[in-house]
């Protein structure tokens, strides 16, 4: 079973919202009744991001490569393990799962797929989908992780039908409550990972003259549409050395808004103890919002 067969019943055209269907059974691309057409890239992903900024949105090559290099070394493996544990704990018992339909998960803002791949390895009978606005990230992910269905699209306007997914995972990504509520099934779970107040505080201390805590609580944005079922905090410290310090910095938003002296100071360090402080939340939909 390849991604073309599986996804055809949930995709909508990003231009006219019509259903997207396989083009003449060729598996080369998809089309809607208004003849809007999208091709699979040679790496296997589908680019459904349209609009004036669609050429180079999201993370650039430097960020994507920094993230891949950093994550591959396992610095955030604890986060990945905790997310999988939370997912498994909320699946219901084995028997019901195996007899039920194929469970469908979407990782929103997946980047190049480090966490998504770990989910796929853990949830083998699931259909795992990954969406990111960065073509660079999706291209890298699709090349490496072939068992995942990859899409380039904006999280704020997703190319999926209502009620398409049993599980949504959102790790360190902007939150779009209306869109999440639209594409998740009524019994579905939303898993959100966000930085808590001490996350990477050590980097901030080096880079900024005065530290401002700007991590907001996702529940403030989600509570209108979703109910917070549980919140687990994950807190640990790790030593980071040499180039990994630079890679970690490059994969954070601080890269874009940090004083030059601070960045130089950080780049001159050979080691740094880094604090990981994240919350892993599970939400359910407040009420039946949408019928197909």
Image (cartoon, rainbow, N blue to C red):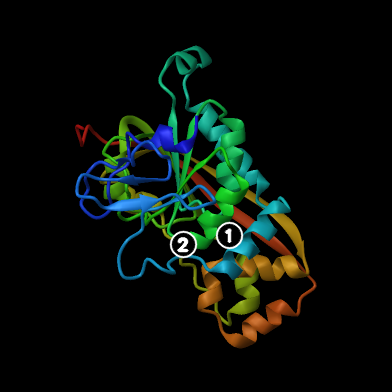
Residue 208, position in %: x, y?
58, 79
Residue occupying image coordinates x 75% and y 69%: 243
Residue 165, position in %: x, y?
37, 35
Q: Report crowding for label 1: few under 14, some 14 to 19, many 20 or more residues within 10 A (C-alpha).
A: many
Compute the Cα span from label 1 to label 2: 9 Å
Q: Which mark is residue 199?
A: 1
Question: In terms of depth relative to the viewer, which is nearer, 215 or 165?
Answer: 165
Q: Which residue is mark 2?
A: 215
Q: Is residue 133 above or below residue 186?
A: below
Residue occupying image coordinates x 33% and y 35%: 164
Residue 218, position in %: x, y?
39, 52
**Contact (Cβ within 8 Å) of mark 1 with mark 2:** yes
Helix, strand or loop status at disc 2: loop
Q: Is residue 61 above or below residue 25?
A: below
In this rendering, does residue 196 appear at all? Answer: no
Rendered-image quadrant of the C terminus: top left
Q: Quadrant of residue 70?
A: bottom right
Q: Earlier in the sequence, mark 1 or mark 2?
A: 1
């Amino acid at each position: 079973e390849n991604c073309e067969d599986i996804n055809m019943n949930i995709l909508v055209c990003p231009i006219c919202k019509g259903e997207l269907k396989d083009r003449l059974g060729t598996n080369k691309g998809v089309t809607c009744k208004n003849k809007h057409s999208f091709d699979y890239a040679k790496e296997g992903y589908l680019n459904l991001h349209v609009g004036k900024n669609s050429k180079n949105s999201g993370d650039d090559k430097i960020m994507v490569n920094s993230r891949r290099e950093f994550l591959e070394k396992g610095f955030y493996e604890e986060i990945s393990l905790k997310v999988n544990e939370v997912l498994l704990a909320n699946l219901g018992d084995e028997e019901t799962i195996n007899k039920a339909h194929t469970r469908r998960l979407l990782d929103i803002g997946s980047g190049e797929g480090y966490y998504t791949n770990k989910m796929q390895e853990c949830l083998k009978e699931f259909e795992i989908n990954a969406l990111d606005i960065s073509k660079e990230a999706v291209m890298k992910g699709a090349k490496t992780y072939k068992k995942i269905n990859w899409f380039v699209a904006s999280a704020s306007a997703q190319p999926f039908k209502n009620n398409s997914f049993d599980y949504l995972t959102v790790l360190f990504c902007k939150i779009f409550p209306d869109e999440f509520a639209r594409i998740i099934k009524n019994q579905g779970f939303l898993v959100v990972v966000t930085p808590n107040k001490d996350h990477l505080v050590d980097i901030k201390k080096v880079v900024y003259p005065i530290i401002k805590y700007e991590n907001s609580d996702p529940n403030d944005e989600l509570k209108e549409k979703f109910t917070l079922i549980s919140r687990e905090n994950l807190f640990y410290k790790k030593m980071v050395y040499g180039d990994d310090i630079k890679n970690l910095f490059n994969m954070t938003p601080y890269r874009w808004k940090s004083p030059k002296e601070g960045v130089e100071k950080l780049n001159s360090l050979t080691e740094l103890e880094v604090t990981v402080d994240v919350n892993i939340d599970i939400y359910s939909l407040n009420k039946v919002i949408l019928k197909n």
